[in-house]
Amino acid sequence: MTRTTPRPGLRRSAAGLAAAGLLTAGSFALAAPVHATDPVFTLGGPAETAVHTYPASGKPSVASVPLTVNNPSEDEEGGGFESEYTITLDLSGVQGVADVTFDSEAGDDCEVTGTTAVCQDWGIYPGLSGIADLRVTAAKGSEDGDTGTIAVTGSADGATFTPFTTRITVGGPDLVMKQIPFTQQNEPGDSQQAPLSFTNKGTRAADGVLLTLMYSSGLELPGDYSNCEYGRSDFAWMSTVLCSFPGSYEAGATYTLDTPLTVVTGEHAYIDTLIYRVGEDGPAQRAAQRSGASFEKGAGPVLTLKKAPTARSGDLNPSDNQQEIDFLTKNTADFVAYGDALAGEAGETVTAELGFRNEGPAWIGYVRSGESVGTVDFTVPEGASVTAKPESCRGVTAKGAYREQQLGAPRYFCDSSMTVPDGADVALPFELKIDQKVADAAGAVTVRGGLFEPEFPFDPKNANNTARVVLNGTGPTDGGAEGGSDGGTDGGTDAGGSEGSGTTGGASATPSAAAASPAGDGTSGGPTTQTGTEGGGLAFTGTAVATVSAVGAAALLAGGALFVVARRRARQG
């Protein structure tokens, strides 16, 4: 059994909402624009929300209904709507069905008068933004199965809003995924069973269920089932499997797979995540989980469910449909820095191809936190100046401190993406103008970790983390452009080194001399260990397990373009 990130909004980012749309059964309904003269903003939110029935005693359970507005402009600088606008909610459709208030802690500037609610706000940035969080409970006297709608409209001078309607229903199925006690510390080749099971803790039966499995690059789920679809995402570090189970799954009953799945720790595993969830099945739910990626239907037997001993509960909580687990595998990855050897006359511009490779066997990814895996520290050779740089690189001073002017800097920090697959080549082309021809001018290229772990904990060969870029070399070879020699971690100075430091290296005020020295002679540019007193902030990388929410994980797994050249891996049958 073998991948969406919205732009930020003025009031609060809708990234969490997008993630929830990916990992929950409900999708966000968005109406189509109806006016073309003024800017057209689309109101949206969950198409339907179920609330628990009104309890015989105690307070009713609260469901959150986030409302959104979408500004379709792609101009992030000048595409914002800078004016006041009003959102009006007609609550008459849920009178006697549900009670509606607003989340004051979220800062919602909304007032309810009778069956009408009015929210005032200012400014709509490009992209999807949250506008209000409704707090909805079943109305006293309502019954299981009662339903109604809330109509949402907007108005502003010089803008048009497309309306939106959301449905509120009392009672319903509540599918709760059971947590599996996986072994989290593993070695390549380890396997363990995943006896997935869930309980319907709601008030009514679910009409078909959809099992979703998302797992990162180092894990494998052998199997090929005809009622499952296998994702072919552009993100090589994430796979998705969707399995449909038709039928009625009654309230109070527990169901489990007839045949437990097997989770295998692959040879490329290091830090990996498995997400497993269950929700009601249907075309909208399957489309939301596919999220535009390509899927193929399996060709093997049918994966089936069986009813287990029942368990009842009065809890109705859509947030417990999903479980997830992180695995830390005892494995290594060899990051190898490489430089270049170039020649040219004064006034010419040459392109230096530098960067690093992950020679495996492990893939490295910090998908929980979204942190950069590593940083390439490049010191420019003497006599040359940078006229063009990769977008991921920032110019700093020779000591690693903040510098406003980005071109022409003596040194550059280039943060990697949050994933570096095995076999990846992180190439960073720099255009260098030769201002003055200097024989054997050399710059240092070092790939390193972050502030607290400059040496990668997974890399057994830190000596090859340093290489050189040589301009107008006079020797028979480039003298080590393809990687450092033993001892390449010695002699490195602090990223931000204090004023007056007498050491040399990657942060030296004489970069060409430092870079030209062989690694290990006490002058090479080794891994950095701290930020400078002038503010050269380094990425906090190297953490084994970050502390972000499950929904945040989904956004990370689905979002962002990788700047590594990743090797795609095929599904294992």
Image (cartoon, helix red, strand yellow):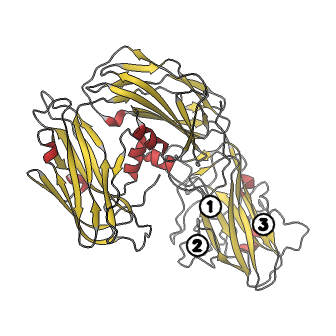
Disc sitting over residue 340 in the figure: 3
- Mark-to-mark CA distance, 1 and 2: 14 Å
* 323 relative to 565, above or below: above
Disc sitting over residue 396 in the figure: 2
- Which of discs 1 and 2 lies nearer the camera? The answer is 2
User: Residue at 27% across / 23% down in the picture?
Assistant: 313
Instruction: Name the residue at the left extreme.
Output: 114
Q: Quadrant of the N terminus?
A: top right
Q: Pointer 2 and pointer 3: residues touching (CB < 8 Å)?
A: no
Q: Position of residue 207 (x, y in %)?
A: 35, 27
User: Residue at 34% across / 61% down in the picture?
Assistant: 33
Q: Secondary structure at mark 1?
A: loop
User: Residue at 68% across / 48% down in the picture?
Assistant: 567
- Mark-to-mark CA distance, 1 and 3: 22 Å
Query: In the shown orientation, is residue 479 left or right of residue 126?
Result: right
Disc sitting over residue 528 in the figure: 1
Residue kind at label 1, given as amino acid type: Thr
Residue kind at label 3, given as amino acid type: Asp
- Mark-to-mark CA distance, 2 and 3: 21 Å
Dot 2 crowding, Cα within 10 Å, few <14, some 14–19, many 20+: many
Query: In the shown orientation, is residue 442 left or right of residue 329?
Result: right
User: Residue at 39% across / 23% down in the picture?
Assistant: 247
Q: Earlier in the sequence, mark 1 or mark 2?
A: 2
Q: Quadrant of residue 413?
A: bottom right
Q: Pointer 1 and pointer 2: residues touching (CB < 8 Å)?
A: no
Q: How many marks?
A: 3
Q: Position of residue 340 (x, y in %)?
A: 78, 66
Q: Nearer the viewer, residue 513 or 491?
A: 513
Residue kind at label 2, given as amino acid type: Val
